[in-house]
Image: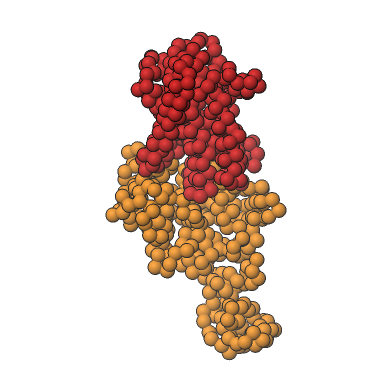
Amino acid sequence: MHAIRLRDVAKSFGPIQAVDGLDLDVPEGACVGLLGPNGAGKSTTMKLLTAQAIANRGELEVLGHALPRESKSARAQMGVVPQQDNLDTTLTVQQNLTVFTYLYRVPRAGRRAAIERALAIANLTDRRDTKVDELSGGMRRRLLIARALVHQPRLVLMDEPTVGLDPQVRQEIWALIDRLRGEGVSILMSTHYIEEAERLADTVTIMSHGRVVAVGPPELLVSEHAGAEAVEVYGPPARLAEIEAEAVAAGHVTRRTGTSVAVLRLNGNAPAGERRPANLEDVFVLVTGEEIA
Amino acid sequence: MTTASLRKRRLGRLERPALAGVLVREAINYSSYWRSTTFASTVEPTIYLLAFGFGFGSLVSTVGGYDYVEFVGTGTVATAIMFSSVFATMYGTYFKREFQRTYDAILAAPVDTEELVTGEVLWVALRAGVYGSAPMLVAMVFGLDPAWGMLAVPGIAFITGFGWASFGVLVSALMKSADTFSYITSIVVTPAVLVAGTYFPLSGLPEWAQVLGQFNPLFHCVELVRHAAFGWEGWADVGHVAAIVGFGLLMWRLAIWRTAKRLID
């Protein structure tokens, strides 16, 4: 059983083909990271899953409901954490949660408990009467996540859950997402922070130009696309170009990191340089291409 | 997207829990801003009432067979309905859609555009029902005699407010930016308030303006309010109700249609 199953989904906005033949699976209970450069189609994919965008073609199934026809039933069982904070800023923490217990049809008898649970998840129990205006950025993001959980959804969509947050706050959010994972909630999380996907996702789907270019568990993707280790060679631009040519001739692949060339898929005769384990970022750059769109 | 695919998307339409969700959100928000809104919605028409009442009242004693304070006291009800409905939705929905992104959050919940728009409009109509009746109470202080029929005024204000609130949602969904709202205010809202028999009777206007007035839902509202206060006029009033309800239903459907186009890609 899949929480999300997309087959050959396409969506265009005028001349722009935002999503172009997308296949995506989120197995029940799994956390799937949706990676991709800006404009790869991640946000459009998220909108398709809540029927806030309607696909031009393809099959979409969320929690067993066919979209867009049965989207409302699917939405009743899923929570959405948007990229852009859309809390009611003049209301208190608790009032924001109360509104969502109604929007998500939490039965009257369970409303109080649902709000208390969400407050505990967000670690905002002491701040229940604080206006959102007066919360820190991290608290707001925790509330935004807790708001999506008042009805104990089976599936949570998160669109760039830690974008714009400082490292300490990012870790808090990661801990929160990890706890959800532990509870067996299915999660689809779009991000362009590689580390985030590496740490949290069971499976990573890398998108580029509206389609999937790589999919699999992070470790597997790394060994498959980048090998076990990378060698970073530093030098002036002319030297870097030489290194690249030599590496390619020797059957390696390379990617620029800005200040160095990383030589990947080593096969014995590696150039001299700094050795490090290959990582998901190497894979990301290899499969999405180096040029900036 | 087409309306056909919209219709396919719905499992249940206009479900009560979805409407309740939208209404509860408005009600809780209202608790944080009711003072300013109540002030604007009651003081503004009261100023009109006083200005016209004393200003014109000193020149004319009766208009269309009514004491001028009776005429203006009932006419200002329409102004109050207009002020508390069309602006609330025109600016309110624009703000919630473009800046607060509230509608993205609501539509991610099990709420459809039809329910979202209906809930928003119902809420504003309820407020118009209350705020619309306020000027009549003020007019009583200045000599408007209470009558049993006046108990119908909140209801009249509600159905009229429903139509104009829907009109505001429609405008908000059609316009590219909030700057253009002032054109609508000048071209539609202000003339509708004035050519409705609010402060002076339509009979004093050129014939083309009188004909135009017949198509103004606010004119039918003013007629109904006067008849509620001074005596019903049978089938004529049924006609007025029909005109207001027709306007409301039309605007409601148009508002849903255009808002869906705006919110669903």
Residue A116 in picture, x, y percent from top left: 31, 49
Colour representing chain B: red
- Find residue B49 and report its image quarter: top left
Give how far across and how far down residue A242 sits, in percent. 67, 86
Residue at 33% over, 57% down: A123
- Please identify the residue farthest to the top as the structure is shown: B234
Chain A representation colour: orange
Residue A243 drawn above or below residue A207: below
Residue A92: image x %, image y %?
A: 35, 49
- Pick the residue in front: B64 or A213: B64
Q: Nearer the viewer, residue A233 or A169?
A: A169
- Residue at the image position 58 percent from the left and 82 percent from the top: A260
Is A109 situated above or below A229?
above
Query: Which residue is located at x 65 percent, y 19 percent?
Result: B207
Give the number of marks.
0
Color style of the picture: by chain
Can I make out residue A75 in this image?
no
Relative to B28, does residue A41 appear above or below in the rendering?
below
Kindly give the residue lying farthest to the left in the view shown.
A126
x, y percentage for residue A272? 58, 89
Which of A2 and B238 lies nearest the eye of the viewer? Answer: B238
Q: Is residue A268 left or right of residue A125?
A: right
Q: Quadrant of residue B133?
A: top left
For the C terminus of chain A, the quadrant is bottom right
The residue at the point 41 percent across, 60 percent down is A137
